[in-house]
Image: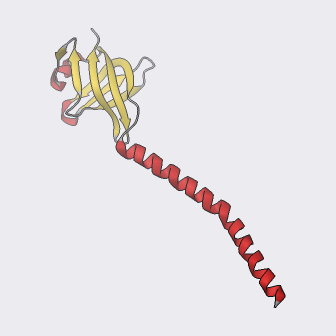
Amino acid sequence: MRKRSILLPGLAACLVLAAGPSYASNKAVATSKTTAAKTVAAGHWQAETLSGKIESVEPNQKLVVVKDASGTAFDMKITRSTRILSGKQAVSLKELQQDQNQQVTVRFVPERRGDVATLIRLNG
């Protein structure tokens, strides 16, 4: 009888120690995935700025393609809240279509659906 009472507490201690690290590591992974998912879902990516020339404008697709100095083309999605300015004057997407090869500065937010322009400013 005495052997059984020593064996059970020892076995219980081993199970707790063996399960402890795996439980802690799983919890840490779940927390980091949850935090990353909340950041992505909330759209909290940092806004970025790009300077380059207008490669093309597709008003029907609400898309502006800007090529930077290294020749890399960036597709910029246009939304209702995107502001397009020439100096201080607002310009429509159709009017911007006439300004191909013009220098622009684009403020955009990278998202899963693509780069979304918040401001397009003609430099000229």
Left or right, 92 with respect to 70, comes to: left
Farthest top residue?
124
**Residue sitting at 73 percent across and 71 percent down?**
13
Left or right, 1 with respect to 37, comes to: right
Specify the quadrant of the image occupied by residue 118: top left
Q: Position of residue 117 (x, y in %)?
A: 30, 29
Q: Position of residue 92 (x, y in %)?
A: 16, 23
In which quadrant is the N terminus drawn? bottom right
Left or right, 31 with respect to 45, comes to: right
- The answer to which of 124 and 28 lies nearer the viewer is 28
Q: Position of residue 57 (x, y in %)?
A: 24, 26
**Residue sitting at 19 percent across and 18 percent down?**
98
Q: How many marks?
A: 0
Q: Position of residue 72 (x, y in %)?
A: 42, 25
Up/down of 50 relative to 63, above or below: above
Specify the quadrant of the image occupied by residue 109: top left
Up/down of 120 relative to 77, above or below: above
Left or right, 60 with respect to 4, comes to: left
Up/down of 9 relative to 86, above or below: below
**Residue sitting at 62 percent across and 56 percent down?**
25
Up/down of 20 relative to 64, above or below: below
**Residue sitting at 40 percent across and 35 percent down?**
45
Specify the quadrant of the image occupied by residue 119: top left
